[in-house]
Image (cartoon, rainbow, N blue to C red):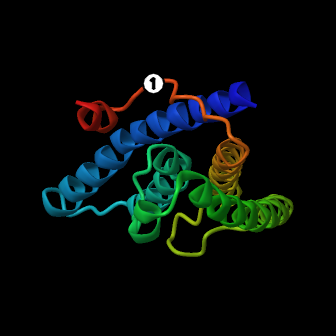
Amino acid sequence: MRTLISLIETISLWTGRLAALLLVPLVFAMVYEVVSRYVFAAPTQWAFEISYMLMGAIFTLGLSYCLRNNAHVNVDILPSVLPRRANAAIEVVAFGGMTVVLVWLTVTLGEGVARTYRTGEGSGLSAWNPQVWPFRLVYTIGFALFTLQVFGRLLEALLVLFGGTPPKHPEATTDEQAGAA
């Protein structure tokens, strides 16, 4: 089980790093739009759509990375006073429920991708009107990876609940290294 948890965390680590690379085309698109609009008085038809689609991709692909690194908003009132195994029991319930909901959500998103692919649905938000299935596919992959990371956290909580210790992260982040010092 520890090997599976480490594999899931490695996938989340690299997915987050790849999602961060999407900032490059997002910045390029925004700079190009601003220069095109204000310097040449020739706004693009595609920059708005590219920007929200890339930002959505960055967000959804970064969800698993965020959970992996505990970078989400968290209120630690109870966890700071409860024993580790009691916290693990709470996490088993929470992450177990989240896994079920996220599996349902991912399947539903996948059905939406298939539907928009079959119908050739466009965004309808600009004159460009790109087909939306590729971007919905990315969102579905992002939620599938988030579901996988939530499942990994469920497995970690089960290990702790039954007296084991979860594996260390495959690679410590800068924040984790600073906290350990």
Q: Position of residue 145 (x, y in %)?
A: 66, 46
Query: Which quarter of the figure has residue 2?
Result: top right
26 relative position to 97: left or right: left
Nearer the observer, 39 or 145: 145
Q: Nearer the viewer, residue 82 or 177?
A: 82
Number of callouts = 1
Quadrant containing the C terminus in the rendered view = top left
Q: Residue at x 29, y 32 (%)?
A: 180
User: Residue 141, position in %: x, y?
Assistant: 68, 48
In the displayed structure image, the side of residue 83 where residue 34 appears, left or right: left
Q: Dot 1 surroundings within 10 Å: few (below 14), some, or many (20 or more)?
A: few
SS at badge 1: loop
Q: Residue furthest bottom?
A: 124
What is the x, y in percent for residue 20?
Answer: 40, 40
Q: Quadrant of the N terminus?
A: top right
**Residue 161 vertical placement versus 114 (above, below):** above
Identify the residue at the far left of this view.
39
Please name the residue shown 45% across and 24% down the image: 171
The residue where tag 1 is placed is 171
> Looking at the picture, how far across and down is residue 157, in whole percent?
65, 49
Front in this rendered view, residue 152 or 36: 152
Left or right of residue 43, residue 83 in this image = right
Q: Residue at x 49, y 63 (%)?
A: 82
Which residue does the image show at 26% across and 61% down from the upper left? 42
Report the amino acid beneath label 1: Glu
- 94 with respect to 31 (left or right): right
